[in-house]
Amino acid sequence: MTRSEVKVNLSVPAGKIRKINGGNLGPSMISNAEDHPYGDHASDFAALNIPITRLHDAPYENPGRRLVDIPQIFPNMDFDAEDPANYYFPHTDDYIKEILDCGTQVMYRLGVSIEHGKKRYWCDKPKDVKKYAAVCANIIRHFNYGKWEGHHWNIQYWEIWNEPENWDWEWENDVAVRRKLPRQFGGTIEEFNEFYCELATILKNTFPELKFGGPSHGEPRKYAVDFLNYCKEHNAPLDFYSCHMYSDSVQKHKDMVFDVRKKLDDAGFKNTELHLNEWHYHPRHPAWYFKSPVKVQRKYLSGYYRESKGLNSAAMLCAVLTAWQDAPIDMGNYYTTGTARGYGIYDLFAPTPSYYGLKAFGDIVRYTERISCECEEPVYALAGHNEKGEYALLVSAYRTNTGCGRIRISFDSGVDISGVELLDEHNELDRIYFEQIENTVDIDYTGDSCVVLVKFTRK
């Protein structure tokens, strides 16, 4: 059995615990039925204590609902942008209200959801940017300023588009060699940069009190510099820059933040917020996957998606959010905090380990006054206390690869431990029995990873 050490230094303050645990998507509208209480995920979602929820791909988790996307609300750009009869708001009104009722703000993505399939229906480059801007402005007025029986929700973050560089690829010898169909923006990168600058400028001039940004690059190391330089050259607003990262490496998630922050600073956007607003536990496919028959790929993917929100995922996401406490990031949005299968945090009806990992981190951020912890990778620890003098410690052991292990937690002064919650192969963040010996407690876990949440007070 491998033993890991975590030392908590209650006498050493370490700043603030930052609430950077954002999400993507809220509870599914088609699941929350009164006659199916097991399908009502609103209370589960609220328990995650998410500060902001990004609205992207909402139609896919809510089949039959016209949600969020510009074409879902304003279906024909040949229509009159000033006629309320040409807009459809009811579904999005209800969707956003439930998310807000769960205690989180929203980031509204202006654009379209990702498209797959043999044809693409919504990815065309907008032909008339001024008309598109007029539609976006009326959507903003509806949700923020009461237009057309609307609301006063004070949504601050408005993101322009998502992954404009995302196209299908053809593969040769496991290497992507050629683009096929667009998944998000049916134009060149240069055309997108021009589109962003024109649209963002119009909207920022119209609503200077709001924050506009984007464009959620999936490959920021490849595309950020040209985008940033174009924005600077055309004096376009960029209140926040957003990008994505999919990996199973904590270090890669951390490196991405520092790398992109440097690109922003070097381009003169030192006051622009950095949002890594899609990220997920994402192991690389093995080389044989791409050469396999469809039947084999399907079987592999079934297990892959179970793994992608399993115990390793839960430990990694807590580890990443802990590592980001000391990184120049303003918000991270896990993809997804929705209830659908695939990248969601549920497996049919039941919450997955990823859900419980997010819930554990949502708890630790309530203890805002951070205190120092010492440990060695692959173990990560974050501790703090609140105004009431209550303390909490979050420990994530990520891929210790032992099948079982022990975490020894020691404190530099007297404590009374009131409870220990464990997420491992046999516990879903359940309270477990523990023995405190002076200022030390040992936590045994089963599996290659685990998450531990300890509550205590000082003597």
Image (cartoon, rainbow, N blue to C red):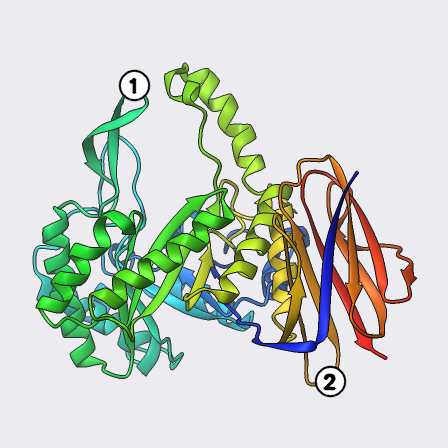
Instruction: Residue at 15% x, 47% y: name it.
Output: 124
Three-letter amino acid code at the position of disc 1:
Asn
Residue 82 visible, this orientation: no
The answer to whether 452 is drawn above or below residue 202 in the figure is above
Q: Position of residue 84 (x, y in %)?
A: 23, 71
| Foreground pick, 84 / 330 | 330
- Distance, label 2 to label 1, CA atoms, is 60 Å
Left or right: 192 as drawn, with respect to 427:
left
In front: 295, or 69?
295
Residue at the image point whose x is 31% and y is 48% from the top:
218
**Badge 1 density bin: few <14, some 14–19, many ≥20, Cα 10 Å:** few
Q: What is the quadrant of the C terminus in the image? A: bottom right
User: What residue sits right under mark 2 in the picture?
Assistant: 388
Which label belongs to residue 173?
Answer: 1
299 over 85 or under it: above or below: above
Residue 195 in the figure: left or right of residue 250: left
Q: Secondary structure at mark 1?
A: loop
